């Protein structure tokens, strides 16, 4: 009924990788996974409750083409160990064949070694990891734990429900899976944008169709989990259409809540960035920074106070560069015990450091990151302390200062034109 009433071109709120809403935490999760592919630890996992969007994130991440990665995706791991190993081999391009577990394992090891010698990074991705049988988990643990395995680039990425963390801690993977990201879903202040994003995708202007009061109630009863937001929003649209309303109002959501017998959910807004490991990225009071210029003009400075700094066109990026040559999620700078790293996130036009194209680079003082026609100079904290402050330099704690004549742009202090 609501399709005709609101003149939608198709059903809204479908799980479509081409229409992914990149909330702040999903951008951080993407950065976490890319970062994990070059980390010394071979295993990482993204954990979250039912409906928080883990599978959609996984599909979006690994739908992107990256010639340096060789991906095996296992969507349903609830199979016996022999079929599990064969599934991995099939994902890597093998035709089905009969063999024992031992033979499958031996062939897989040889293949991984061979692909690394060709410059590839093999990645085994497991969705619904909380359903992974103990035998299959043991095989993955054996692969990840073989220190004399020539294929030291092998990475295993788990996506599973929160309870999978307990399984990790009690299994032979526990010592390997040191990197964990807890996905909680959308923040309360993102629900309105999420709803508008999906309504615009089906031919509706989106803005104003669901009132702010209705969106707030949707947030309260969904807890920010996209699956719950979608279900409740669709029922609210039905209620509004049935009442001949031109907008979804608070009463529409209240009727949908009653029909679905929902109760208010606890908000995880404060816990959105619960990311392991690394207790702190700082090694003292001095803080490293990126000085941003374009065509010789200083646009601002961004202090690297977070564990992960996202760079790209997307509005939730920490450094937003709104030029066509910049990808939505272009690159990130992250910190670990070794220092600050620059990591290209499979951008369309690539990232250069000191005029050389790179995917990963351990940053040193005065390194010049080149993204499109932007230049981001890395300034180490020690080097900064050794020289007097420049009166021409602009800096800030967690945003990028704008040097721009456009008044509208000035309103967005995190945006770089």
Image: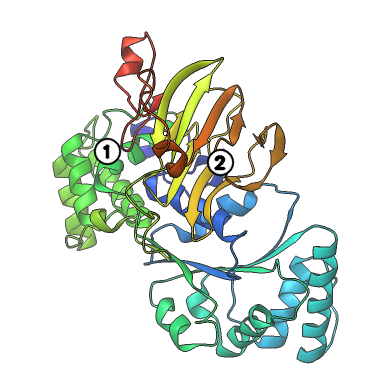
Distance between the Cα atoms at labels 1 and 2?
Answer: 44 Å
User: In screen coordinates, is 97 left or right of 192?
Assistant: right
User: In screen coordinates, is 131 left or right of 414?
Assistant: right
Residue linked to disc 1? 241
User: In the rendered structure, which disc, 1 or 2, sits on the residue that comes first in sequence?
Assistant: 1
Query: Is 12 drawn above or below residue 256 in the view shown?
Result: above
Residue linked to disc 2? 331
In percent of the image, x 53 and y 32: which residue is there? 377
Nearest to the observer: residue 221 or residue 385:
385
Residue 179: give its label: none
Residue 305 shows up from this direction? yes
In percent of the image, x 76 and y 90: which residue is there? 101
Residue 187 picture location, percent across and down: 29, 48
Give the quarter of the figure containing the N terminus: top left
In percent of the image, x 85 and y 71: which residue is there? 95
Q: Based on the displayed image, in which of its 4 quarters is residue 281 positioned?
A: bottom left
């Amino acid at each position: 009924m609501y399709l005709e009433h609101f003149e939608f071109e198709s059903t809204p709120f479908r799980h479509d990788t081409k229409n992914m809403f990149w909330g702040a935490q999903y951008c951080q999760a993407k950065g976490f996974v890319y970062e994990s592919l070059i980390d010394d630890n071979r295993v990482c996992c993204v954990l979250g409750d039912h409906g928080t969007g883990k599978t959609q994130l996984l599909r979006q991440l690994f739908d992107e083409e990256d010639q340096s990665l060789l991906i095996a995706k296992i969507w349903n791991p609830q199979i016996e160990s022999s079929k599990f190993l064969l599934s991995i081999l099939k994902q890597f391009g093998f035709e089905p064949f009969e063999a024992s577990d031992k033979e499958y394992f031996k062939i897989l090891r040889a293949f991984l070694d061979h692909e690394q010698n060709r410059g590839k990074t093999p990645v085994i991705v497991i969705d619904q990891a909380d359903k992974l049988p103990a035998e299959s988990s043991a095989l993955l643990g054996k692969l990840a734990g073989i220190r004399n395995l020539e294929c030291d680039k092998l990475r295993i990425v788990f996506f599973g429900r929160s309870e999978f963390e307990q399984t990790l801690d009690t299994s032979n993977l526990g010592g390997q899976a040191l990197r964990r990201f807890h996905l909680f879903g959308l923040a309360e202040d993102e629900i309105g944008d999420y709803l508008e994003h999906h309504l615009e995708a089906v031919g509706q202007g989106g803005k104003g169709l669901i009132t702010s009061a209705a969106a707030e109630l949707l947030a309260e009863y969904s807890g920010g989990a996209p699956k719950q937001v979608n279900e409740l929003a669709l029922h609210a649209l039905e209620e509004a259409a049935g009442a001949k309303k031109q907008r979804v109002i608070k009463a529409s959501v209240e009727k949908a809540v009653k029909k679905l017998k929902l109760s208010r959910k606890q908000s995880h807004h404060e816990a959105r960035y619960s990311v392991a490991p690394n207790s702190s990225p700082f090694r003292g009071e001095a803080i490293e920074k990126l000085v941003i210029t374009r065509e010789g003009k200083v646009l601002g400075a961004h202090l690297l106070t977070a564990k992960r700094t996202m760079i790209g066109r997307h509005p939730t990026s920490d450094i937003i560069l709104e030029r066509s040559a910049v990808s939505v999620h272009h690159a990130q700078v992250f910190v670990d015990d070794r220092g600050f790293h620059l990591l290209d996130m499979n951008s369309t036009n690539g990232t250069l450091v000191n005029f050389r194209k790179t995917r990963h680079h351990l940053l040193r003082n005065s390194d010049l990151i080149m993204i499109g026609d932007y230049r981001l100079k890395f300034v180490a904290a020690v080097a900064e302390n050794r020289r007097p402050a420049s009166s021409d330099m602009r800096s800030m704690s967690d945003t990028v200062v704008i040097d721009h004549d456009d008044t509208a742009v000035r309103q967005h202090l995190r945006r770089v034109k």
